[in-house]
Amino acid sequence: MRLKEKEKVPSIQKQKTLHTKRSMTISNHSITKEQTMSLGTFLTLYIAQFVPSTFLMTALQVTMREGNYSLATIGLLNLVRLPWLIKFLWSPLIDRHCITTKDYKHTIFSCEIVYALALLFTGFFDVKSEVTQVIILVFISMLASATQDIATDALAILSFRKQDHSLLNSMQSMGSFGGTIIGSGLLLIVLHEYGWQVVVPCLSLFVLLMLLPLLFNKNIHVKEKQPRERAKLADFIWFFTQRKIWKQIGFLLLYYMGIIGIISTLRPYLVDMGYSMKEIGFLTGIVGTSASFVSAWLSGWIVRRMGIEKARILMAFLILLAPSYFLALSFFDFHKVAFLIGIIYIQACYGLATVVVYTSAMGCVRPGREGTDFTVQIVITHVSGMLIAVAAGSIGEIFGYRGIYIAETIIALFSLIYVLKVLGKTDKNQPL
């Protein structure tokens, strides 16, 4: 009888251990009400960044062209985006200043108020006759928005558990893609109906309203930084001196390259096929970006379930299929449905990849320098995207669209091999 009781004890202990493991697994994959509220809060902050900026860039280009400005002058308009490319220069100042949750919130509120005021004053000027004043104010708004982004990213990294970063990055990507859909689509229709001096001031009110969730959310907390973790002005340089960080930099440079070149040439290709500006805007701006929006949400859950290592490999393989598909299409006559499928698929791949890249980047930040390190990595992806877009134009000029598809297929294949062979050998202790 005693022997049977002894045999039952290990069995009961084993069941308790299994139950504990299952409970931990469930808790790791479940999202609390407070986390959901916080995710929604960050979604509103990212939407507040992208809706006005996307609208301003699109509306200014259209309005200036209607005012008979030259294409060269309109092209210079892209310089107002400069703060987003060089924001890593002042990101250490944000990391150094923001010690507590209150500091981060104060920085975000201050930047958004400047952003809203710049938008408000922008609406008081006539774009066609007072373009200089408008561009100066748009530059100020971009500067404020870029600074807010540094503080928002750092607060997001610190206030969420590492296993929840993928869902957080879904919110960031969805905010970006959703802002593009609203800013470059819906608001242009509203602009046509109500005019510049009504829509732009309303955008300033929109920016302030997007701050309300952060104002009332009491569930966002960060651990106060220690004095030894305070950032220094040159910390964005020291990021590159870390041991083995160059594996991550190679990943950031390569991961998008297999699709960005094609995405940048979708509109010119559709023009060559005889599509109108309205049709192109619908296919790429609405349909394509909607695919990115949905896939960004899906990618967050995939990364959370699979882990960043397996997700990187899966997405790299899916990315490889995109240029391969367009390459196959180039051997046949143009077919609208087939090309639309390609647009949806490649934009979906872009949405999937952004969450993987952002989550990987969040895993490679140093304590006390979260905003700086994350910003540096995202700027690297932006620079990489610009370079491949420029290269795609040159390749297309010489070898045609098929030449672009061949080059992109080779790059995507190399990216997959890099993820498998280089990142696959990364030490488990590394944050990659």
Image: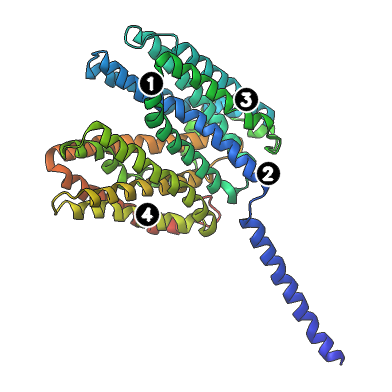
Q: Is residue 57 above or below residue 373?
A: above
Q: 10 Å neighbourhood of mark 2: few (<14), some, or many (≥20)?
A: few
Q: Which label lies toward us, 2 or 4?
A: 2
Q: Is residue 69 visible?
A: yes
Q: Residue shown at 55%/43% (left/top)?
A: 168
Q: Which label lies toward us, 3 or 1?
A: 1
- Determine the residue located farthest toward the right in the rendered image: 2
Inter-mark Cα distance, 1 to 2: 40 Å
What residue is pinned by disc 3?
Answer: 97
Q: Is residue 216 left or right of residue 282?
A: right
Q: Which mark is residue 34?
A: 2
Q: Which label lies toward us, 4 or 3?
A: 4
Inter-mark Cα distance, 1 to 4: 43 Å
Q: Secondary structure at mark 2?
A: helix
Q: Secondary structure at mark 3?
A: helix
Q: Where in the figure is residue 210, as x and y percent of width and height?
A: 57, 28
Q: Amino acid at mark 4?
A: Ala
Q: Is residue 249 visible?
A: no
Q: Which mark is residue 316?
A: 4
What residue is pinned by disc 1?
Answer: 193
